[in-house]
Amino acid sequence: MAAPFSTSIELRHLRYFVAAAEHGSFRKAGVALEVKESSISRSVRNLEDEIGVSLFIRHSSGVNLTLAGQRYLSRTRQALDQIREANEEAAAFGRAEEGHLRVGLFSKLASGFLADLFHRYDQRYSGVHIDFVEAPAESHAAAIRRFDLDAAYILGRQGWADCDAIPLWSEPLFFALPRLHRLAQSRTLSWRDLVDETFLVRTQGSGNEVRGFLERKFRELDISPRISSQQLARYSLLGLVATGRGIVPVLESETIISVPEVVYRPLVGEVIPFSVIYSPKNDNPAVRTLLSLTRRMAQERAATR
């Protein structure tokens, strides 16, 4: 039966043993490690006593490995390499140099604050892999509570149970119109201008939030808006706008998307706020660095406005 592993063996015993084997001398190993020769000799003797076998043949000019010592040296090097790699990986993860993030979005990354944010994050933390998830805010909040998401960038400033929030930037609201639309010649729009329009809204992603937003705004005018739900990607709705099937609310940052026969006009006085939500119980180091960069960029953006 194999002898049980002794918990009395210390890492320094193994390091001193490897150094003695590589230098063929306790004295030379001590010089290389800046340790007294007697400490090397005593540690190796303690190691031999613990495992119950001689690792070296000692002679006047130094030491040579026994057959058992040769086998032990190979395994010890492997063990020390694995410990070193584990230490490096843990340290890198703790500094968020490596790791994994799952981030919720209200829309695809195209331009503006989020595009700039993740470009800068990738430059600083290239070892962190990020998975992006597009879904409604309530789904993001539920996923954060389950720790299936690390953070979510959402429209609005609504509070969510068991989630902390950081208010971020705001963007003016525009509408995408057909180029030949009656309002395309207007420099700005009002909600009253849009009472007879058909609004195109997605059935997925942030579609429900957009629908709710439109319904709330027109409720203030005692009007029920015409909303057409479409099972399309967000930017595919712009193709329907070009054919005259309706109009679509878009953010200022999305107006860089060029679609033939589509123009963008701002809605006077309407600004959409954004925030990021996360769990205060999430101990992923990578999310801390992401939130720190998010705060800093939001402050920089606010200072320039």
Image (cartoon, rainbow, N blue to C red):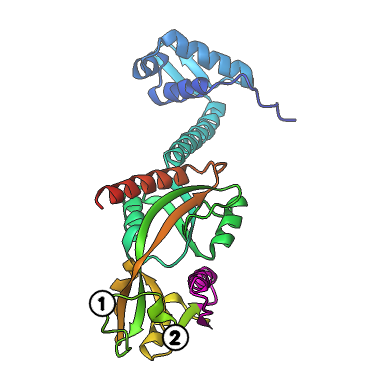
Could you tell me residue 36's position as x and y percent? 40, 9
Magenta run includes residue 210: yes
Depth check: 107 or 218 in front?
A: 218
Residue under the image location 61 percent in, 16 percent down: 49
Q: In this view, does 35 lie above or below 280?
A: above
Residue under the image location 30 percent in, 76 percent down: 265
Tell me the magenta residue range: 202-229
The residue pinned by badge 2 equals 196
Q: Describe residue 92's horizontal placement relative to residue 261 as left or right.
A: right
Q: In this view, does 197 lie above or below 122?
A: below
Residue under the image location 46 percent in, 77 percent down: 233
Secondary structure of the residue carrying numbered label 1:
loop
Q: What residue type is labelled 1?
A: Arg
Q: Which quarter of the figure is the N terminus placed in?
A: top right
Report how far apart the C-alphas of labels 2 and 1 lie in the structure: 19 Å
Depth check: 249 or 80 in front?
A: 249
Mark identifier at residue 72: none
Q: What residue type is labelled 2?
A: Asp
Depth check: 59 or 259 in front?
A: 259
The residue pinned by badge 1 equals 187
Secondary structure of the residue carrying numbered label 2:
loop
Q: In this view, does 283 lie above or below 39?
A: below
Could you tell me residue 120's position as x and y percent? 31, 52
Magenta run includes residue 70: no
Choose the circle earlier in sequence order: 2 or 1.
1
